[in-house]
Structure formats: structure tokens, C-alpha cells
Image (cartoon, helix red, strand yellow):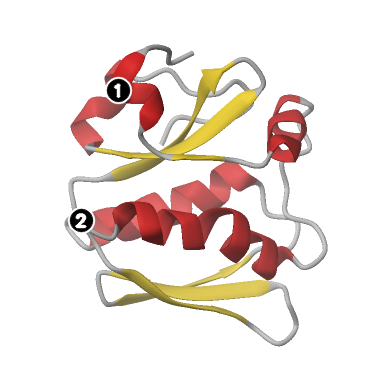
Amino acid sequence: MVTGGAETSVGFVLDSEWYWRIFEGEATFGEAAGATAARDFLRPLAWLAKDRVAIDEIAVDPDGDRVSFRIAERPVAVRCRDLRVDRFVDVINRSLADAQLDLAVAIVESRRYELRCVLVPRGELPRRAFARGTLAP
């Protein structure tokens, strides 16, 4: 678990429902999967990353199962229905790596019953503790 000062102030807090879903092994996008991915992860991440990389053109497909977006002007499309959240984070991290950016997204515990989605330098990942129930990027 990541605790203390500046590390916990970076990132955005995930809705408390994600905390329980992740720890109960139910961390998948369900109905309205694309809208959920955009609302809970991509839009806050775009705001967080705005000074480092452009994450834009976030759009949910009409069927609601997919979300498309751009990372550093590179298009990304993900079918989110029944996709595990950690696999969604993997897609974002592969896209950051493909854009040759030294950044990674991770879900970390910032305090009891609270998870944050953080953007960190890729080299910092080995020194991080990740939320139980998620995979390290």
C-alpha cells in the first residue's frame, strides 16, 4: 500500500464502488462499459495528464461497449464490456509506451477503502505498491 505525503496527493480518487469490486474480484466493466470507462477513468486521467500528454477525443461508440480516444495523437479503441479494469489500464500503458512516453498508469491504495489512479514515471513502477486485486503495469 502506498502511504504518506506527496505520493497520495497525486492522481484521482476512484469511486468507492471500484474499491469493493477490485477486492472482491469483480473488477470488470459491465453494462454501459464504454461510458463507465470514459467517466471513471479516461476523462479524469486526461485532466491529470494534461501537462504531460494529450489524452483526447474520448468517445463512446453507439453500442456502448467500446470507447475510443487518442493518446499523444495515436488512436486507441477498446471494447470494454466485461473487460477487467487492470486490462484496461494495460491498454493505456501500452499506448503510452507506443507513444514513447516515460509514463505509466497504476491503481494504488492511498488510504483505507480508497483507491487512486495515478500517473507515474515508468521507472518508478518497481518502487510502487499496487492495490490488491490489480496487476502492476
Asked if 93 appears above or below 20 in the picture, the reply is: below
Asked if 72 appears above or below 134 in the picture, the reply is: below
Instruction: Report the residue at 43% width, 16% height from top.
Output: 2
Give the Cα distance between marks 1 and 2.
18 Å
Residue 106 is situated, as x and y percent measured from the top left of the image, at 43, 36
> Which quarter of the picture shows residue 112?
top right
The disc label shown at residue 39, or none:
none
Crowding near the residue tagged with mark 2, few <14, some 14–19, many ≥20 C-alpha atoms within 10 Å: few
Crowding near the residue tagged with mark 1, few <14, some 14–19, many ≥20 C-alpha atoms within 10 Å: few
- Between 27 and 53, the residue placed more toward the observer is 53
Q: Residue furthest right?
A: 31
Mark 2 belongs to which amino acid?
Answer: Arg
Residue 117 is situated, as x and y percent measured from the top left of the image, at 47, 39
- Residue 129 appears left or right of 74: right
User: Disc 2 marks which residue?
Assistant: 52
Mark 1 belongs to which amino acid?
Answer: Ala
> Which quarter of the picture shows residue 104?
top left
Local secondary structure at mark 1: helix
- Residue 135 appears left or right of 61: left
- Residue 57 appears left or right of 82: left
Q: Nearer the viewer, mark 1 or mark 2?
A: 1
Instruction: Report the residue at 61% width, 26% height from top.
Output: 114
Residue 131 is situated, as x and y percent measured from the top left of the image, at 55, 23
Instruction: Report the residue at 39% width, 61% height from top.
Output: 46
Query: What is the quadrant of the C terminus in the image?
Result: top left
Q: Sequence-wise, which precedes: disc 1 or disc 2? A: 1
Instruction: Report the residue at 35% width, 34% height from top.
Output: 10
> Which quarter of the picture shows residue 25?
top right
Asked if 136 appears above or below 81 in the picture, the reply is: above
The disc label shown at residue 6, or none:
1
Local secondary structure at mark 2: loop
Residue 105 is situated, as x and y percent measured from the top left of the image, at 39, 43
